[in-house]
Amino acid sequence: MIPSSTQEIPKGLAAVNRTWMKTKICCGSVLNEDGEVEMDASIMNGKDLSAGAVSAVRCVANPIKVARLVMEKTPHCFLTDQGAAKFAAASGIPTIPGEQLVTERNKKRLENEKLQKSDYQKNLGTVGAVAVDCRGNVAYATSTGGVVNKMLGRVGDTPCIGSGGYADNDIGAVSTTGHGESILKVNLARLTLFHVEQGKTLEEAADASLGYMKSKVKGVGGVILVNKAGDWAVKWTSTSMPWGAAKDGKLYSGIDLGDTSITDLP
Ligand SMILES: NC(=O)C[C@H](N)C(=O)O
């Protein structure tokens, strides 16, 4: 399942845009106050709670790959900035020029944000996934450039296990998107799973945790979640959230409330 608040993805994505996904490399991230890309990512395996995360990563195409290597190849859970960069290079992850991640569209968004002409909810850019395999193992991965015009060195929720996502085979897996500072304050991913542990359905749990975040800190966002039985839910309180889900030969997708479309998987 894939949620994304990235505006790089054209409307109609998930189901309809598998072609787009095949043909267009979705590249770039939102820019920080210096016009540069700094990315955060995290990943977790619900089988044994192994987890890996990176923050303030520059000059790599896919920070989630570095997060996965942190999980698989180090005794740690979280590397940041220069340490993450050194580890990525030593692990064979190619370094690319930072400018390659800067798109015209994101330059414009930064310009607008600096002029205070932008819509906050359109200034986010995150991709997340949750999955369950045939043995009931669940996992999540979340990756982001954060928020437009963020301070240099700002770390959001995405790389923080329990906020940007969580996975535990006994409960389920969650990936989150939205206002990072709000998500951090309520540990949105783990909070959602707490509600599942208390007996709520996935949808009820998502509503409860997103509702709590809105009422406590006025934060908006979205969550996608699965459990080991293969049930899934997608919920958001932001204006829209492009998402897609594949199950039993069907592809479900949507962006705005109430616009779910269902097609056959090839
Ligand atoms: N689009 C997003 O989800 C942004 C991310 N949660 C952050 O604040 O860094």
Image (tube, grey):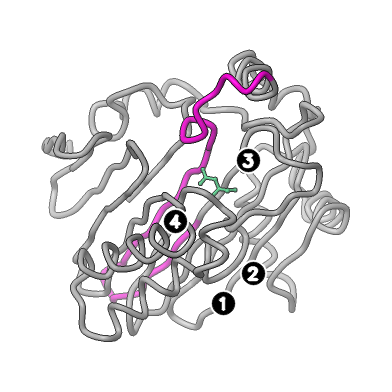
Q: Position of residue 141 (x, y in %)?
A: 49, 57
Q: Residue at x 68, y 17 (%)?
A: 111
Q: Earlier in the sequence, mark 3 or mark 4?
A: 3
Q: Position of residue 197 (x, y in %)?
A: 30, 84
Ligand 1 has an atom within 8 Å of the beta carbon of the residue at disc 4: yes
Q: Is residue 44 left or right of residue 5?
A: right
Q: Residue at x 51, y 60 (%)?
A: 183
Q: Residue at x 30, y 26 (%)?
A: 17
Q: Please report contact status of discs 1 and 2: CB closer than 8 Å, yes or no.
A: yes
Which of label 3 and label 2 is nearer to you?
3
Q: Which residue is mark 3?
A: 145
Ligand 1 has an atom within 8 Å of the beta carbon of the residue at disc 3: yes
Q: Which residue is mark 2?
A: 71
Above or below residue 111? Residue 69 is below
SS at mark 3 in the image = strand
Q: Position of residue 42 (x, y in %)?
A: 59, 60
Q: Is residue 1 left or right of residue 180?
A: left
Q: Is residue 85 left or right of residue 64?
A: right
The answer for how far apart the CA atoms under marks 3 and 1 are is 23 Å
The answer for how far apart the CA atoms under marks 3 and 2 are is 20 Å
The answer for how far apart the CA atoms under marks 2 and 4 are is 19 Å
Q: Residue at x 37, y 51 (%)?
A: 222
Extent of the magenta region: 115-141
Q: Which residue is mark 4?
A: 176
Which of label 2 and label 4 is nearer to you?
4
Q: Is residue 225 magenta?
A: no
Q: Earlier in the sequence, mark 1 or mark 4?
A: 1
Q: Is residue 160 left or right of residue 5?
A: right
Q: Which residue is mark 1?
A: 50
* Residue 166 vs residue 110, the one in the foreground: 110
